[in-house]
Image (tube, rainbow, N blue to C red):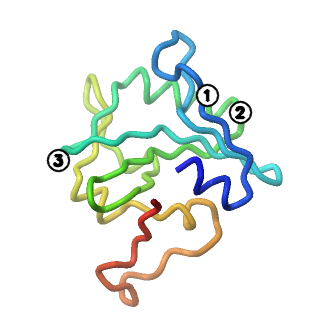
Amino acid sequence: MIKALFDRKFSVVRAAGSGVSSMESPDVIAMRNGRVFAFECKAWNSSNLSIEKPKFESALEWCNNGGAQFHVAWKVQNKGWYFLRPELFSASPKFYSISRNNALKRGESLNTVLGIQTRIPKRLANAQAIEAVE
């Protein structure tokens, strides 16, 4: 994903030690022309993606403080990357979660997230409309 962002002319940083510090930050930060994106990256082969509530909320707060757009980037085995807005996640007492099926239906391509292309309306899209970033 870092290479894909760099290839699109973004300045990209992989946050060293994300997830191991008491000062949480997203995994990847990308910037270009005053636009800032922050990504929490997961590569889990599971029917659900769950992120601990404090970690998810810390990432949101970090983004609000820094003026960044927050997305969870889920690399789904044999499908590619799906970019998920925070409002797609359901909250429970301990986690924010999304099902794999919902992520596959509602996730966006990297180009859509970055504003390089617009989302194709469902009536025009075929089953392969979501771009997989390698």
Residue 83 falls left or right of residue 6: left
Q: Position of residue 77 (x, y in %)?
A: 27, 53
> Which residue is depicted at the point 50% across and 74% down?
119
Up/down of 16 relative to 130, above or below: above
Q: Amino acid at mark 3?
A: Ser
Dot 3: within a 10 Å radius of its alpha carbon, few (fewer than 14), some, or many (20 or more) residues? few
> Which residue is depicted at the point 52% across and 50% down?
1
Which residue does the numbered mark 3 point to in the structure image? 47
Up/down of 105 relative to 10, above or below: below
Element type at mark 2: helix
Residue 14 falls left or right of residue 86: right
Q: Nearer the viewer, residue 56 or 19?
A: 19
Q: Position of residue 54 (x, y in %)?
A: 41, 20
The C terminus, quarter of image: bottom left
Q: Nearer the viewer, residue 91 or 15?
A: 15
Q: Position of residue 37 (x, y in %)?
A: 64, 46
Up/down of 23 relative to 37, above or below: above
Which residue does the numbered mark 2 point to in the structure image? 66
Outermost residue toward the right in this view: 33
Q: Nearer the viewer, residue 75 or 40?
A: 75
Q: Position of residue 129 (x, y in %)?
A: 39, 78
Which residue does the numbered mark 1 point to in the structure image? 62
Dot 1: within a 10 Å radius of its alpha carbon, few (fewer than 14), some, or many (20 or more) residues? some
Element type at mark 1: helix
Element type at mark 3: loop
Q: State yes or no: discs 2 and 1 in contact (Cβ < 8 Å).
A: yes
Q: Quadrant of residue 108?
A: bottom left
